[in-house]
Image (cartoon, grey):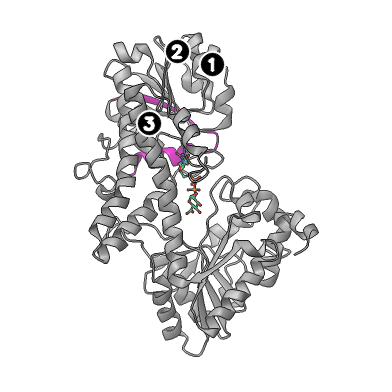
Amino acid sequence: MNSEERESGLPRALSFSLNLHPLSVHPSIPSSPSLPLLPSQARIDAWNSDTLPIFEPGLDEVVKACRGRNLFFSTDTTTHVGGADIVFVSVNTPTKTRGVGAGKAADLTYWEGAARMIAAVSSTPKIVVEKSTVPVKTAEAIEKVLTRNAPDVAFEILSNPEFLAEGTAMEDLANPDRVLIGGKETPEGRRAVEALAAVYERWVPTERVLRANLWSAELSKLIANAMLAQRVSSMNAVSALCEATGADVQQVARCVGTDSRIGPKFLNASVGFGGSCFQKDILNLVYICESVGLQQVADYWAAVVSMNDYQKTRFVGRVIEAMFNTAAGKRVAVLGFAFKKDTGDTRETPAIDVCRGLLADRARLAIYDPQVKEAQIMEDLHTAKFEWDHPRAGAGSSKQGGGTPRAEDVEVVACPYAACAGAHALAVLTEWDEFRTLDYARIYDGMTKPAFVFDGRNILDHDALRAIGFVVYAIGKPLDPFLNNH
Ligand code: UGA
């Protein structure tokens, strides 16, 4: 690839892969685990509309530039999947909620359905690429489904795990740290690996395209997420220690992160990690370890999730304790509900547990998030949590207790000032940039006194807030005398 091509950025990069494999996207729902997937017309229609079904910075521009040219969204699997040389499978692999492995193992229903669909429409050789995060050895199972259902078709399965993060997905895709391709160590397997590598090498420097065997590629994805989550849990553990000793977690992170062996990224203590992947992938890893008899290894990784649960519980405890041990009847403004900034995604967001914890103490919540819709927040707060999601809670309750919140206790508002009006406290749960520059003097004037700020992301200017008159709690920071002494 020449420098002009590399500089041309993502739309060009995307068009290469899509030109070579002019396949449409087929988000689908399973009819039953034993049947091929049924395409979801509603979802495809949304992808073909002016309002895409997900928010991701830069996505709109790329989709609009490529759609109808070399990017097609369609339910016509016979034409598009049947006619493709390479098929990427990017279906959901959530944690199983019932049956064997419930609460930990990955649910491969969608993957199996996709494999059956591919087999049903295939008459020419195909490379089938696992994009979804899957347990080790999934490729073997998928190959069995494909070859038993379409015995005359040659299939090669590759593992090509996705490492992009929400909020920076388009940037990560255009300029990845690495692309990992795992394949069988046979001549056909190696040929398939090279075919896919050639696609990426149109815009990714060759040295960043890594080859591995299938099982290493599958496992690498789980381990990458587990180690990222482990870093956050490590800093969250340190944040509790900082509060107890008067150390400052951000100063510790800066000092530790300047060691080039450790590095500065992913050392931000927070109210807890969220997102659809970290917890799911660690639980899956724990299940795999247990399945092969490695209980100590399983316990080691499970502790990363336990520490995350502890951090969310600890935050709720701080809020309630600061407000004289009761949140009952007090209005708390919740700023941010998404699991991180620049996304509208709420899957496993720490805000769900924090809100439920506050509601269990009978707080009244006014929630504002620039991207999350009211219906989503209400659904998240009303959906019963599985016991497995909260291993340390009693049966049938959320970790924070409380059960279903009362409708009158939750208000979703369209602006942060409205959320804070009349509130006893405001809690920052997502690090949206706009929260850094709000008029906090104005907010303070409209709040009940003492007015509390609970910064779950360490993004605010705490000294400036104290100068205004706020009582401030921030994760892993020296405690306000007010909080220490009352
Ligand atoms: C994560 C990984 O970073 C991606 O590499 C991976 O491809 C993706 O999962 C996946 O498997 O799909 P994502 O969940 O989108 O990406 O977001 P992250 O940026 O990793 O953040 C995860 C959570 O950790 C967020 O709640 C974030 O606020 C939190 N976090 C992150 C911290 O609390 N502190 C930090 O220093 C970094």
- Report whether 66 appears left or right of 342: right
Look at the image and say whether residue 376 sits in the magenta stretch: yes
Viewer-proximal residue, 218 or 142? Answer: 218
Indicate the quadrant where residue 74 lies: bottom right
Label 2 secondary element: loop
**Identity, as a three-letter code, of the amino acid under mark 2:** Phe
Q: Is mark 3 within 8 Å of ligand 1?
A: no
The nearer-to-camera label among 3 and 2 is: 3
Which structural element holds mark 3?
helix
Q: Quadrant of residue 179?
A: bottom right
Q: Disc 1 marks which residue?
A: 440
Please tell me which residue lies in front, 466 or 126. Answer: 466
* 447 in magenta: no
Neighbours of disc 2 within 10 Å: few (<14), some (14-19), many (20+): many
Image coords of residue 172 (percent x, y): 60, 52
Q: CA distance from mark 1 to mark 3?
A: 25 Å
- Cα distance between the residues tagged 3 and 2: 21 Å
Task: Kindly indicate whether the residue at mark 3 contacts the one at mark 1 (C-beta within 8 angstroms).
Answer: no
Marks 1 and 2 close (CB-CB < 8 Å)? yes
For this rendering, which residue is in front, 385 or 74? 385
The number of callouts visible is: 3
Q: Earlier in the sequence, mark 1 or mark 2?
A: 1
Q: Residue at label 3?
A: 239
Q: Residue at x 66, y 69 (%)?
A: 199
Q: Are marks 3 and 2 in contact (CB under 8 Å)?
A: no
Q: Which residue is mark 2?
A: 470
In which quadrant of the rendered image does the C terminus lie?
Answer: top left
What span is colored magenta in the figure?
Answer: 362-383
Residue projecting furthest to the bottom:
152
Q: Is residue 408 above or below residue 20?
A: above
Q: Amino acid at mark 1?
A: Tyr
